[in-house]
Amino acid sequence: MGERLSILILDDHRMVAEGLAALVAGQEDMEVMGIGHSVAQGLDMIRSNKPDVALVDCDLNDGTAADLILQTKALGIDLKVVVLSDSDGFCSIRSAVEAGARAFLLKRMPMTVVVEAVRSAHAGRRYLPPEVASRMAEAMSLEPLTAREKEVLGLLAEGRSNQDIADRLGIGVGTVKIHVNNVLSKLDADSRTEAVIRASLYGLVGIRDTLDDASADQPMR
């Protein structure tokens, strides 16, 4: 057997990190180089040990996998990164892949998929399971939101009323209604709540605790 692949594991959920470490340790061609729980820890270990592949949680407590990848590139280090996420939001997938991730997996996928992705990444191949690829393709078919529409969408996700949004953005209520209608149309949504849910699935916003409030606002169509 040749030299083992050196694997870095970064996940701010310790049980997940330990589970991934056990998985890696059980492979004849892999070994755990280190376990960390933040971007900062990861960068320190990458600088010191230069692992072959990193298994990285999409959202760490001090940044994202995309942040880690971009900062690693700035150091001149070519690290193969496999990103794992609890969510299949398009924005998370896109930001990680555009930053240079070799694979994007959902944590609910079988552990055999993780192992396959690590080997594929080390070989220089991109690995996007069908479920992830289909979500990405679906979201890419959407008409892009303008900067103002994104602002309005973010405020909708906070459960803001038309008047609240108008006051926050310094525009008229009628203009807010136009922007909201555009958001609903582009997201193919029939209500504010549906728009927020669909936007969350695509990673455009996070679902807030105030989501129920959004459904209480007046209809926009």
Image (tube, rainbow, N blue to C red):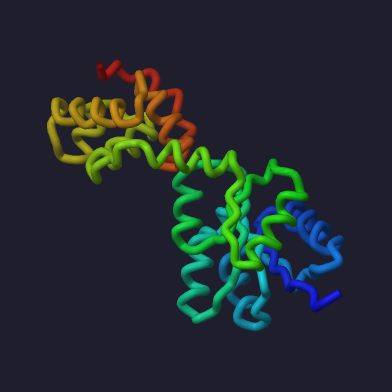
Q: Left or right of 29: which side holds 151?
A: left
Nearest the eye: 211 or 83: 83
Residue 199: image location, x then y, percent: 41, 35
Residue at the spot 86% in from the left edge and 74% down from the top edge? 1
Horizontal relation, residue 192 to residue 136: left or right: left
Is residue 196 or residue 111 the one in the foreground? 111
Q: Nearer the viewer, residue 78 or 179?
A: 78
Nearest the camera: 130 or 201? 130
- At horizontal 26% and vertical 19% (from top left) the residue drawn is 220
Q: Position of residue 128 (x, y in %)?
A: 58, 50
Determine whether 137 is above or below 47 in the image.
above
Judged left or right of residue 34, residue 44 is left
Q: In which quadrant of the rendered view does residue 81 lie?
A: bottom right
Q: Is residue 215 above or below residue 100?
A: above
Report the number of discs. 0
- The residue sitting at 76% across, 49% down in the picture is 111
Q: Where does the image place residue 59, in percent across and percent down from the top left? A: 56, 54
129 over 82 or under it: above or below: above
In which quadrant of the rendered view does residue 173 lie? top left
Q: Name the quadrant containing residue 149.
A: top left
Residue shown at the point (37%, 37%) measured from the top left: 141
Residue 19 higher or lower than 144, as above or below: below
Question: Where's the C terminus, which quadrant?
Answer: top left
